[in-house]
Amino acid sequence: MEAASCISSEGQPIQCKAAVCRKAGEPLVIEDVMVAPPMSREARIRIICTSLCHSDITFWRMKDAPGICPRILGHEAVGIVESVGEDVREVEKGDVVVPVFLPECGECEDCKSKKSNLCSTVGFRVSPWMPRQESSRFTDMKGQPIYHFLFVSSFSQYTVVDVANLTKIHPSLPPNRACLLSCGVSTGVGAAWLTAGVEAGSTVAIFGLGSIGLAVAEGARLCGASRIIGVDLNPRKFEIGKKFGVTDFVNSAECGDKPVSQVIKDMTGGGADYCFECVGMASLVQEAYASCRKGWGKTVVVGVDKPGSKLTLSSAEVLHSGKVLMGSLFGGLKPKTHIPILVKRYLDKELRLDDFVTHEIDFKDINRAFDLLLEGQCLRCVIWMNK
């Protein structure tokens, strides 16, 4: 990746194009916006390319809080630092960076601990503002503020990101692969690798074979799992899943009178060692939990459910089964620590990123990316900002 020179505009607002969500569920509007210079502990980034994640669609559709308009969505991306604000030491102009919704300040108790990736200084929340200043760096051409998304807002040619949400990467990684590590692939691989700690020779069941579920399969494959069972309604996902190590497929619509959990127990002789819910549906979390083996089975929740969704579990089952149920935000990865490891594994031809990219389009066609994902025609659609 070439660290191309940026326009000399340090300390000044930049006018550029952005795809703005003006109304929930309606096509994004490509319009001119003003991007303010970075404040303390922030950097302004020229986005090279971005990819569409299902979380973008979830919030694009959302009419009530935390949904809000007008907003610049997008959170999977790669870019080049155009300028930095005061007290920024981690990156400098010209660095190639991946913005990540999950911060890592490197200084708080959580960031220093190996047990957590949930920074307590900056923290993660679905806010319409920058994380420290509680204000926006975007305005439209009438001077009205435009809201941020997940501290990234990559559907803009330029954006401003807190340094805690930026990870510097090796410039040799192609940008249409680098952007995948900003959210989806890292989340899935990390969920298997770090959150679950999948062991060589173990059995894994994955509920939902979208991009996240396939990334979990890739992570389980890298960890040496001997059997990876994919559960989905779409039989075409099995052929796709084979590329990422899926060995067996269960069509949840064709299980007859048996619940999926019983099918998996029958297949594995008592339940999978590790189960992953990758759709974002409370009922599937319960089915995944029922599918994992008593005594040591571990169920990891990766999918993003709608706000307010609740689980119902039998307290007796929780007590008597000895199983573990846990969540995994960004796959348990610490962005600045673990993304460079994933970059190296790709460059060493271990991590499969190429097969996740099924479509690449120009920024002007960004609404087509939404159509492709909604129609189930793509895994990841890479959007080039100035190609």
Image: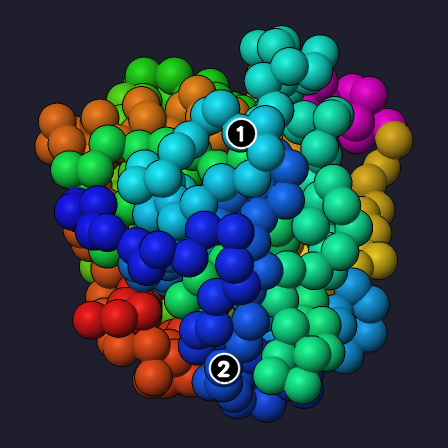
Place of residue 136 in the rendered image (x, y in percent of width and height, measured from the top left): 70, 60
Q: What is the residue that sits farthest to the left in this orientation? A: 349
Task: Classify the position of the C terminus by image quarter.
Answer: bottom left
Task: Please provide percent x and percent y for residue 33.
Answer: 54, 76
Amino acid type, callout 2: Asp
Q: Nearer the viewer, residue 377 or 36?
A: 36
**Please, is residue 171 above or below residue 120 in the view?**
below
Please tell me in which quadrant of the rendered image residue 254 appears: bottom left
Q: Are marks 2 and 1 in contact (CB under 8 Å)?
A: no
Between 366 and 239, the one lying in front of the other is: 366
Label 2, residues with CA under 10 Å away: few <14, some 14-19, many ≥20: some
For residue 23, which quarter of the picture? bottom right
Q: What residue is drawn where x is 78% and y is 50%?
A: 134
Looking at this view, is 91 or 62 the one in front?
Answer: 91
Q: Amino acid at mark 1?
A: Val
Tag 2, which secondary structure? strand
Residue 328: percent from left, percent from top: 60, 35
Q: Is residue 62 visible?
A: no
Could you say which disc has been placed on residue 88 in the image? 1
Q: Identify the mark nearer the N-term, 2 or 1.
A: 2
* Residue 182 position in % (x across, y down): 42, 45
Quarter-wise, where is residue 337 in the image?
A: top left
**Distance CA(mark 2)–CA(mark 1):** 28 Å
Secondary structure mainly formed by the magenta segment: helix
Residue 328 in magenta stretch: no
Q: Is residue 327 above or below residue 229?
A: above
309 sits left or right of 195 in the view: right
In the picture, measured across the screen, residue 225 lies left or right of residue 288, that is: left
Q: Which residue is mark 2?
A: 32
Write the residue at 31% across / 23% down: 341
Give the left or right position of residue 210, taking residue 41 as reference: left
Which contiguous range is marked in magenta? 316-324
